[in-house]
Image (cartoon, grey):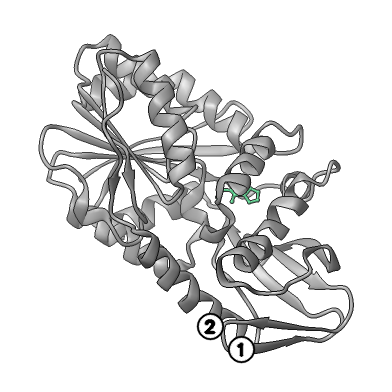
Amino acid sequence: MSAEPLEIHLEERDLDRSLREDVRVGLTAGEKWLPPKWFYDARGSELFEEITRLPEYYPTRAERAVIQRHASRIAEVTGAKTLIELGSGSSEKTRLLIDALSGRGTLGTFVPLDVSVSALRQSTAALAADYPRLRVRGIVGDFTRHLDRLPAGGRRLVAFLGGTIGNLMPDERAAFLTAMRAALETGDWLLLGTDLVKDPGIILPAYDDAAGVTAEFNRNVLRVVNRELGADFVPEEFRHVALWDAEREWIEMRLRAQRSMRVRVLDLTVDFAEGEELRTEVSAKFRPEGVATELAAAGLTVEELWTDPDGLFGLTLARA
Ligand code: AVJ
């Protein structure tokens, strides 16, 4: 089967409207910020794929190792007929789940959901080619807004991998998990990947690699704003900064203005003092007991919580 046409729940003009809103709110705030979802245009999605192959970026390899080890158990416990993946990107690691669920003969449909049309086009075409008997229904959407549009019925397993949940702020995370529970039927499953708290000496290089790929990924958000909204950021004049917040146990990525700058965007004039920083991402790290508490607070029951052999990354299977 070839992939079905993408179902679009985020039209160009919704995207444009929410980017404008985010830019207006974030760049006029006392401490300037932009949400991380705007990294992922075609170039940003490619840069992220490149990050996943860097020696310093352990999360992707660690998560793949946990999934590999427990995929057959996940297939056995869930018996899922429909696998939904939120923020699916390339869906590379998800192939392990597709293989395990297909091996048990239960899986009929795979539904990747992502904001990036380019990433979805590629992943759905590749999956449809490699899994001719699988129905592949890509959805262009935002996992913080479109959980009510997921296909209904039939023993569903929702995978939210990569530690992407860590990109939500704590209040957004709680709202997301509650919305997730509401979107599921009792008996459906959630498979959640979370990066774990560990020595910052391991975490920091993952967000500040020697080859400078993460720095380019970070600056890409300025290129997106320039292109989409006609802004005049000079990305090269911003330095990539990654820092570990020990209290909140999260990584922040920021862009530091190397000189004072005036940027025009929309009808705004945005001034940066020399050294002023724009926060572009929070990537929270978790403790296993914290994951369980947050899931329980949303009405989800933990069935299993696994980590990779090095204890770097967590994978939780929870039941609605
Ligand atoms: C894919 C969102 C989980 O937070 O680690 C990689 C994105 N940012 N390097 C992460 C990211 C900087 C990544 N997530």
Depth check, mark 1 against mark 2: the one in front is 1
| Front residue (pair 307, 150) | 150
Quadrant location of residue 231?
A: bottom right
Q: Residue at x 59, y 34 (%)?
A: 60
Residue assigned mark 1? 268
Q: Position of residue 298 (x, y in %)?
A: 27, 59
- In this rendering, does residue 298 appear at all? no
Q: Residue at x 59, y 26 (%)?
A: 309
| Residue 24 drawn above or below residue 240 | below
Quarter occupied by the N terminus: top left
Name the secondary structure under disc 2: helix
How many numbered marks have been drawn onto this rendered protein structure?
A: 2
Q: Is residue 109 left or right of residue 22?
A: left
| Front residue (pair 101, 223) | 223
Q: Earlier in the sequence, mark 1 or mark 2?
A: 2
Amino acid identity at mark 1: Leu
Q: Is residue 180 left or right of residue 239?
A: left
Q: Position of residue 201 (x, y in %)?
A: 79, 48
Q: Position of residue 123 (x, y in %)?
A: 44, 30
Amino acid identity at mark 2: Arg
Judge the density around disc 1: few (<14), some (14-19), many (≥20) Cα neighbours within 10 Å. Answer: few
Quadrant location of residue 269?
A: bottom right
| Residue 309 drawn above or below residue 185 | above
Q: Residue at x 49, y 76 (%)?
A: 20
| Residue 140 drawn above or below residue 19 | above
- In this rendering, does residue 169 appear at all? yes
Judge the density around disc 2: few (<14), some (14-19), many (≥20) Cα neighbours within 10 Å. Answer: some
Name the secondary structure under disc 1: strand
Identify the mark at residue 24; answer none if there is no mark: 2
Asked if the residue under mark 2 is in contact with the one under mark 1, i.e. CB atoms within 8 Å, the reply is: yes
Q: Position of residue 248 (x, y in %)?
A: 60, 67
